[in-house]
Image: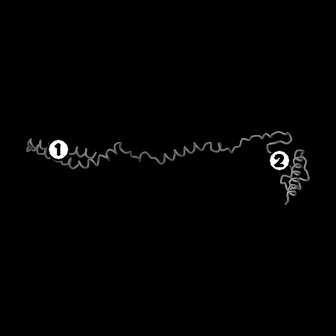
Amino acid sequence: MSLQEAAEARKQKLAALKKRKAAALTGTKDSADADDNNPDAEGFKFRNYDADTGKARKHARTDEADTVEKQVEGLADQAIAQDELQRAQELDLTNIQPKKPNWDLKRDLDRKLSKLKPKTDLAISQLIRKRLQAQRGTATEPATDELLAGMDKAGAEAEEAASDEE
């Protein structure tokens, strides 16, 4: 296609547009418009412009019932209520037994006290024997002093062991 042929084709298109525009402004139907491959054979359709008055069209706003705000209006409250019901069903307070407030201290001290337990048991058994002997009347005063000295010695060893671990 040469430049001259392209120019002629463009001129024809512009002339057809002028005719359509004139026909749309006058409101008449032109036979040339029907011959073109134009899907809009009646002329231009203006959405926001009224060709009769020459002014912008004012569309009446309709309140649509399907707005997002109206659709979501009660969903938040409904979801919160449903969540509370589900939590109430899952969480039965009668089955929950809380830990004592000092459970972690007891856990840490059990390891340290396990070393002292045999010495404590030995001291208690010695005290019981001495009391039984005292009740029978066969216990002597030096034995009680000896027992107390042994307990003091065991207590001092326990304190040293505890301070070494820290």
Q: CA distance from mark 2 to mark 1?
A: 111 Å
Residue type of the residue flagged with mark 2: Lys
Query: Which residue occupies 17% across, 48% down?
Result: 125
Residue 57, image x, y percentages: 80, 40
The residue lying toward the viewer, choosing from 135 and 65, is 65
Q: How many marks?
A: 2
Q: Is residue 88 left or right of residue 108?
A: right
The residue lying toward the viewer, choosing from 119 and 30, is 30
Q: Quadrant of the C terminus?
A: top left
Query: Which residue occupies 80% across, 45% down?
Result: 47
Residue 87, image x, y percentages: 49, 46
Furthest residue toward front: 3
Residue 137, image x, y percentages: 8, 43
Residue type of the residue flagged with mark 1: Lys
Residue located beneath label 1 in the image: 153
Query: Which residue occupies 25% across, 46% down?
Result: 164
Residue 112, image x, y percentages: 27, 47
The residue lying toward the viewer, choosing from 89 and 153, is 153
The residue lying toward the viewer, choosing from 96 and 41, is 41
Q: Quadrant of the N terminus?
A: bottom right
Q: Classify mark 2: helix, strand or loop.
A: loop
Q: Are marks 2 and 1 in contact (CB under 8 Å)?
A: no
The answer to whether residue 5 is above or below residue 45 is below
Q: Classify mark 1: helix, strand or loop.
A: helix
Q: Is residue 130 left or right of residue 70?
A: left
Q: Is residue 129 left or right of residue 64?
A: left
- Point out the tag, 2 or 1, that comes first from the N-terminus: 2
Residue located beneath label 2 in the image: 45
| Crowd tier of the residue under label 2, counting other residues whose Cα lies within 10 Å: few below 14, some 14–19, many 20 or above | few
